[in-house]
Amino acid sequence: MSRTQIVIHTVLMTIEIYEINIRFYNSIMSHWNDIVGHDWAVDMLSKAIELDRLVHAYLITGPSQVGKATLARTFAQALNCTSPEQVDRPCGVCRSCTLIGTGRHPDVFVVKGEQGRRGKRTLKIDQIRELQKALNLTAAEARYKVAILEGFDNANANASNAFLKTLEEPPSYAVLILTALDPDLLLPTVPSRCQRVALRPVQTDLIREELEKHMGVDKELSRKLAHLADGRIGWAIEAAKHPSLLVERSSRLALLHEALAKSRVGRFEMAAGLSRNPDDLMKLLRTWLSWWRDLAIVSIGGMQTTIAVNIDDAPTIQRLAVDWNTQEVVRSLRQTDEAIWQLEHNANTRLVVENLLLKYPLDQLANDLVQETATG
């Protein structure tokens, strides 16, 4: 049995032992107090509604799965909730809140980029034009027509330029909500026309508390998920609901350890295999990036440094922090980050992966074990 198979088998056994008993958890999240770790943003948006100080466009930024889409949807529900008491909006139970939460409200539009190669989405001009047509019609039943454009940093140049006119002269009854990873990835004219809401990674303790109190996850697993989430509460919730995400993540980490134990010839062969699945490659490299970041922190800070994310791989990280010099570790971290950037900009997949694997240092202990197994 290979190392990868052993790791996957171990994770599956762990999941069976834990037998996660998740109580009913409302994935629609229809109340302000369901937003975890972004109290200041909730306070700002709820007061804007209460005091009637809304602006026509908002730009919500932050890391992937940190809660941008959830905040945008809850804001849309609060804008159109029909509860008689302002303090109760969004109520989560009225017709408007329910329709928005399930994506069926006729006056609330959610626009996402179309899926392409390597899992990258692209927001295209045709989608923007369709949205503009819809916004120009009067509202069917809502107080505000709301457009949520998820991942606007994935809009191509034509789509971004086409949407500028709507940002400059929006209908009086419309509220535009854009989400993006980073405002610097957008045309400068886009952030300048929006009120910014910059979300930060959610604290590990808050994620753990959410998993335990509201999802019934046991303490040991909630601690593990909270660390692996790296501030992405959305990922932690999904991983608690779908244990297969942990299996996938463990298999990606096992592939990294397999690569580190291989010779140059073995790494060439491995690169050929990995490059055949470009759609999975970005997730793979992002997992590797978080591992190299943890290793770099320990290598620089010393053995007493707390591992931020990959706590389940602490023994290997601590061993390699001693075996490898800090320069090698930091170089590998930067090289992995650069490989992700290159793939996002359509570089040759196989060349990028080959170059990356060849620059990684050799895990001599793991290599010796492979050689012993092969000769024994």
Image (cartoon, rainbow, N blue to C red):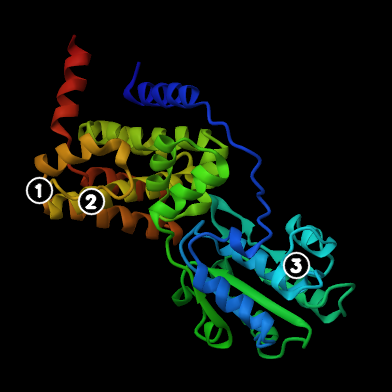
Q: Position of residue 58 (x, y in %)?
A: 60, 78
Front residue (pair 238, 136): 238
Classify 107 as above or below 330: below
Q: Which mark is residue 137?
A: none
Classify 169 as above or below 352: below
Whether residue 99 can be seen here: yes
Residue 309 relative to residue 326: left or right: right
Residue at x 69% of width, y 65% of height: 111
The mark closer to the camera, 2 or 1, is 1
Question: Which tag, 2 or 1, sits closer to the chain's start?
Answer: 1
Query: In this view, which residue lies farthest toward the bottom?
Result: 169
Helix, strand or loop at label 2? It is helix
CA gap between label 2 and label 1 equals: 11 Å
Q: Which residue is mark 2?
A: 332
The mark closer to the camera, 2 or 3, is 3
CA gap between label 2 and label 3 equals: 42 Å
Q: Position of residue 141 (x, y in %)?
A: 88, 72
The crowding category of the residue bearing disc 3, from other C-alpha atoms within 10 Å (few below 14, some 14 to 19, many at least 20), is: many
Q: Which residue is mark 3?
A: 109
Query: In the rendered structure, which amino acid carries the disc numbered 1?
Result: Asn
Residue at x 32% of width, y 24% of height: 3
Question: Which tag, 1 or 3, sits closer to the chain's start?
Answer: 3
Helix, strand or loop at label 3? It is strand
Query: In the rendered structure, which amino acid carries the disc numbered 3?
Result: Phe
Q: Which residue is mark 1?
A: 325
The quadrant holding residue 9 is: top left
